[in-house]
Amino acid sequence: MRELLFDAAVIGGGAAGMAAALELDACGFSCAIVEREDFLGGILMQCIHNGFGLHEFAQELTGPEFAERFIERVRSSKIAVFLSTTVTSFDAEPALPCDLPGASTPPPPLRKLVCVSPDGIALIQCRAVVLAMGCRERNRGNVRIPGSRPAGVFTAGLAQRLVNIEGYIPGREIVIIGSGDIGLIMARRMSWVGCSVKGVVEIMPYPAGLARNIVQCLKDFDIPLYLSCQTTNIFGADRVEGVEVTPMENGAPVPAKRFRIDCDTVLLSVGLIPENELSRAAGVEISGATGGALVDSNLMTSIDGVFACGNALHVHDLADWVAEESRRTGRRVAEWLRGSRPALQLRAKAGANVRYVNPARIDPARENKVYLRSLIAKNDAALELRLGERVIRAVKKNHVQPSEMISVNVGPKDFQGQAAQVAAQAAALENAALEFSIA
């Protein structure tokens, strides 16, 4: 069994893993990327549509073009890359100290990653681990759609891979269940290859995808969007023959108004879930709201020295935001390896009309980028940051909706006067928290 030693190991070679590893390499630390596919780039390699890179590179790129920018940098760096390699487990055991650049405190214990590849088993030892495994699709079982189990039911991401990478068309007459971004993009993609997309069925009263995808993928192709409609049956014996759609009123289905859409293929676009089976097995605390790890202001999980970023932490709207967050994670890992620790971390929590807040801790002494999702769709909204009984900041938002992530920078300027006094006492106050709410 091969044994390898690095300062840090990044699990996942998509945009998140590469961005974090590149930052660690730039900070002078040895780093390895472990990727289970036989190529870097992750899901980006099957996303041949454009819309990537506008924030990261100030250019509109396809997914593979966006990934290639990072892949080229990884290839020209000192980062070790292990492809077709799966991490089966990792743990922590004390070990003898080793030299770390700029370290001001004794180094943390080595963590051991057991990896399996066609070449056999390898043991990677490192001081820090970055979880960047991305996310996976929810399937029919997650949303409990009744009916038979014929051929022709796919997740939208699988259909995307079949069309864009494998060169197969999964069907000819398509119904898409759920208005997530992958489903919307596949509605357009299937139209381009000559299929008939009969409609997109969404249980909520508003779309789940970005507004630009509603316009570019549905309206531009005259594809019907059925809002406040539930898919109540899938028909077919050997192959899908149609779906039953039941409109909803006041949150309840109205069977008298149900209708059938004939089709031979159903694509499910019913949400994404952070990939965290490995994290759970290692004992990382998982958020019930996001499905990703609970992290502090340094993006570190409940296990010391284990960090998380990108879609493995929470599902992002854009790959650009994944890269930005992951670079910041790489910098935080480098600081942690050098012995830097925050003096105080203030708990962050979701308030009214907010589904979740990430990270779960705020360092009042430095700038923090906080992400959250609204529970409501509203125009002329206000994001309020409340510490105790006092609103320390209010941010106007022209529009908020659950499908679009909100980000806000929180830093020392927000903790002044009375608020600073409360923050200073936060370490001794069990219930002290910075609350984010939408009004």
Image (cartoon, rainbow, N blue to C red):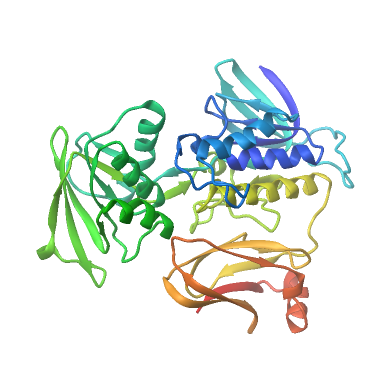
In the image, residue 185 sits, relative to residue 343, either above or below, namely: above
Give the side of residue 372 with respect to residue 144, left or right: right
Compare residues 11 and 195 and report the one nearer the observer: 195
Q: Quadrant of residue 358?
A: bottom right
Whether residue 239 appears in this view of the structure is yes
Residue 266 vertical position relative to residue 224 in the rendered view, above or below: above
Q: Residue at x 50, y 40 (%)?
A: 62
- Which residue is drawn at the image coordinates 60% and 19% (left, top)? 121
- Residue 305 rendering spot, x and y as whole percentages: 71, 45
The residue lying furthest to the left in this view is: 256
Q: Is residue 112 visible?
A: no
Give the x, y percent position of residue 328.
70, 51
Q: Is residue 235 left or right of residue 156?
A: left
**Where is residue 255 shown, x and y percent of the image?**
13, 63
Report whether 161 appears left or right of 2: left
Is residue 117 shown above or below 182? Answer: above
Q: Where does the N terminus fall, quadrant-wise?
A: top right
In the drawing, does residue 261 fall left or right of residue 416? left
Q: Residue placed at 32% from the left, 28% from the top?
A: 168
Q: In the image, what residue occupies the spot 24% across and 56% down?
A: 224
- Residue 159, x across and y down, in percent: 34, 36
User: Quadrant location of residue 154?
Assistant: top left
Q: Is residue 279 above or below residue 418?
A: above
Q: Nearer the viewer, residue 398 or 381?
A: 398
